[in-house]
Amino acid sequence: MAKLILLFTFFVNLILNFAWLTAGFENRLPCSLRWVEASTGDFPPSTAIASHSGKIYVARAYLHDYEKRTILGWYNREENVAEFFYRDSDSSCKPIIVRDITTFEVLDNPNSCEVKWSPSASGLDVRVDPDVPTFVARAPAKSDLWYPGELKNNDSIEIVVDNEVTTFRNYQILSSSTGGLHLDMDEFVFDPPDNSAPVVNSVSVEHFRNDANAHVTQRVSHSRKVTETFQFPISSDFKVSKYTASASKSVGFPSFLGSKTTVKIEQSFTEGIEVEKIEITETTLTINKTIVIPPNSWITVCSTINVQEQVEVNYVARGVYSAKGVTPRALFVILQEEGLDISLTDQNIVLTPVRGKFKGSVAFSTDFRATDGFRAGC
């Protein structure tokens, strides 16, 4: 007789993936671009940001004069030209144009952020230097080609083209954002089940006869369906009002004896309203055994799956927040402003506890036996 005890800890491997989809600047997160080294004669990375049709690339360089300064310019790969300019401390001074810089940086988008050129600021605008409130912008400066310039206020930008600096009041600002948050859940811990829940025994009885003078091998299979209900509340405990418009999850239920049922749940909700998603699934549990029937013999095989019905337990899982192109530390600061129950670990992981409820049937043991077929019953 073989007996398997199903513990609720078998749900530890259960993984739920949440992807929040957002729309509009007000629902998006800032996504990190990076400045990478480049030089004249080299091709920029395939993900480099161009201000116009892959011809003119956003570039910056450093001035090592009495103070280290970052200056914005552009790089034209076709003409193999990089051009920058700066002014001395007084912005009214005559611009100083620099064309002899051969090593500089281009703006790169390795995280596949969504980048846009917009006529107004969005709060997701890309800075020339993280320590200075100046932003990357562009304007059609020559032959309808858009060249990048540095926006220091919301009034105008200056662009250098062909050794001449021109001021533009009609411009577009570069923004970089990502579509939303992801919450991955694992390490489920379930409360102990209530032992008062009713137990149902699913019994299968089969008879096998071997009239041959040799041993016969026989495969025996017994299946039983159990119903599982998984409840997940989308509530203010972990909902992010500024960035969340809808949520989805994929639930994989590891079954008692190795099979697996996967359910995809789509859930949309309105900001400020707490809702709950309930999904009911059926999982088929199967016992497979191989028996050997002696010559000229009868065998009766009895298999039982013991199922506890109407089980209802609470769970708590580890939730891990992430967002494409957003560092965990930056994401932690954003979610802190939302007032969520979160923490930042030494491994740079943003954690939150997620609670829910499991209801359904749980197969907690099996029984299998083979007896002499001439005896009655099992």
Image (cartoon, grey):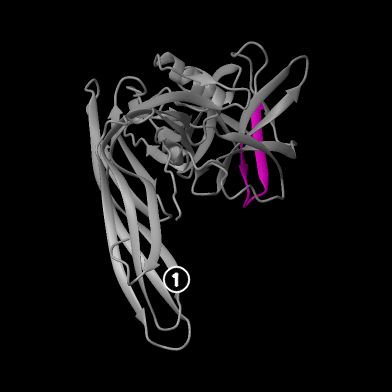
Residue 44 x %, y %: 64, 47
Q: Residue at x 59, y 21 (%)?
A: 130
282 versus 272 height, above or below: below
**Label 1 sits on residue:** 291
Residue at far front of view: 375
Residue 58 x %, y %: 57, 37
55 versus 100 height, above or below: below
Q: Is residue 155 visible?
A: no
Residue at far top of view: 90
**The magenta segment:** 74-85
Q: Residue at x 53, y 23 (%)?
A: 330
* Quadrant (top left/top right/bottom left/bottom right) for the N terminus: bottom left
Magenta run includes residue 104: no
The three-letter code of the residue at mark 1 reads Ile
* Quadrant (top left/top right/bottom left/bottom right) for the C terminus: bottom left
| Left or right relative to 66: residue 211 | left
Magenta run includes residue 77: yes
Residue 175 x %, y %: 45, 31
